Image (tube, rainbow, N blue to C red):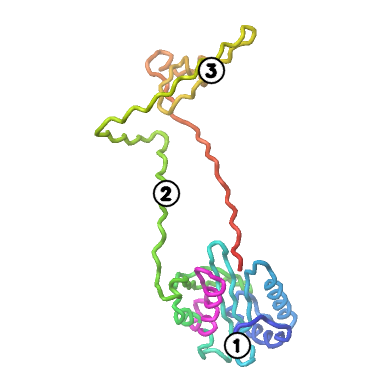
């Protein structure tokens, strides 16, 4: 058993395999019923093989020089090292254990050569032989994807199986990595935890000598008024500060709430806008 790139002289043999309705019943593409459609498929696989970095490996399965099917590996994500495999064999070579051997070769390619971390495979739930192949290579069932493919006008489900690099090496499932991050900032209006009292008072920090006061501006130049500090969340503001020279000086006096005009309750600032800057990180694919 070996995997190799397709060649132009594989056209007729591949068309007989991919055009067989029994094979096409389990493929994500329609039956390649004519040499022209099979030739277009081979041309597309050759084009994808030249892509840099290469994402798709559509390989011929060969035994003793005889083309018996195809084995596929698609890289779903370079940063996350994810891939998906598929095996499609000639019907007269079914039930000989060749599907299991071909799948093992694909996993060897994925984990040893391409350094992927997780590989998945999907099967028609009615394809019991395909499900047994996944179990033979120690892949785990992960559920059923409903209506994954639209083939010949009908939606088809797929059963999902997967295996990770540690599992393939016989190490079993590894625990998820826990990242320690900073505590979330409290929401606006939420009470803040009081700082614990220290047993001993903190030593006073040394005081720096105050710089000399700036010279007063000349009489001809108006002095710049100091910037007004913004009120903190929860600070109590009077109506003069809100509607006089304060935050809402453009409002008319009639807009002042009656309780504040009468001096019963001062206004309280309860909202604040915080702007954060988000850093964008570009992720490049790994070199193959």
Q: Residues within 10 Å of mark 2 (few under 14, many from 20)?
A: few
Residue drawn at the location 43% of the way across and 17% of the way down: 238
x, y percentage for residue 84? 55, 71
Is residue 112 inside the magenta stretch? yes
Q: Are marks 3 and 1 in contact (CB under 8 Å)?
A: no
Q: Which mark is residue 226?
A: 3
Earlier in the chain: of badge 2 and badge 1, it is 1
Q: Which mark is residue 90?
A: 1
Any mark on residue 181, and which?
2
Task: Measuring from the top left, give residue 195's x and y in whole percent.
Answer: 31, 35
Label 2 residue SS: loop
Q: Depth check: give the residue in front, 250 or 246.
A: 246
Residue at the limit of the structure toward the left, as seen here? 199
Q: Are marks 3 and 2 in contact (CB under 8 Å)?
A: no
Point 65% across, 77% down: residue: 30
Q: Give the mark nearest the N terminus, 3 or 1.
A: 1
């Amino acid at each position: 058993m070996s995997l190799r790139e397709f060649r132009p002289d594989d056209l007729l043999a591949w068309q007989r395999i991919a055009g067989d309705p029994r094979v096409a019943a389990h493929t994500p593409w329609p039956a390649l019923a004519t040499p022209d459609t099979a030739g277009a498929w081979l041309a597309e696989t050759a084009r994808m093989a030249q892509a840099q970095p290469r994402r798709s490996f559509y390989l011929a399965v060969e035994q003793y020089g005889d083309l018996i099917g195809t084995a596929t590996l698609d890289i779903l994500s370079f940063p996350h090292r994810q891939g998906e495999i598929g095996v499609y064999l000639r019907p007269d070579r079914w039930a000989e254990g060749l599907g299991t051997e071909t799948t093992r070769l694909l996993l060897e390619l994925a984990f040893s050569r391409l350094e992927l971390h997780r590989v998945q495979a999907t099967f028609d739930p009615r394809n019991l032989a395909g499900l047994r192949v996944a179990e033979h290579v120690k892949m785990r069932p992960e559920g059923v994807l409903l209506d994954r493919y639209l083939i010949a006008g009908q939606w088809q489900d797929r059963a999902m199986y997967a295996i990770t690099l540690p599992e393939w090496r016989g190490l079993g499932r590894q625990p998820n990595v826990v990242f320690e991050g900073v505590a979330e900032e409290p929401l606006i209006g939420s009470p803040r935890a009081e700082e614990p009292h220290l047993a001993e008072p903190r030593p006073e920090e040394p005081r720096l000598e105050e710089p000399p006061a700036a010279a007063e501006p000349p009489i001809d130049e108006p002095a710049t008024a100091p910037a007004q500090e913004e009120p903190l969340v929860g600070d109590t503001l009077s109506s003069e500060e809100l509607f006089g020279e304060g935050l809402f000086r453009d409002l008319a006096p009639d807009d002042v709430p009656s309780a504040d005009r009468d001096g019963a309750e001062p206004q309280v600032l309860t909202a604040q806008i915080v702007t954060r800057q988000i850093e964008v990180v570009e992720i490049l694919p790994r070199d193959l």
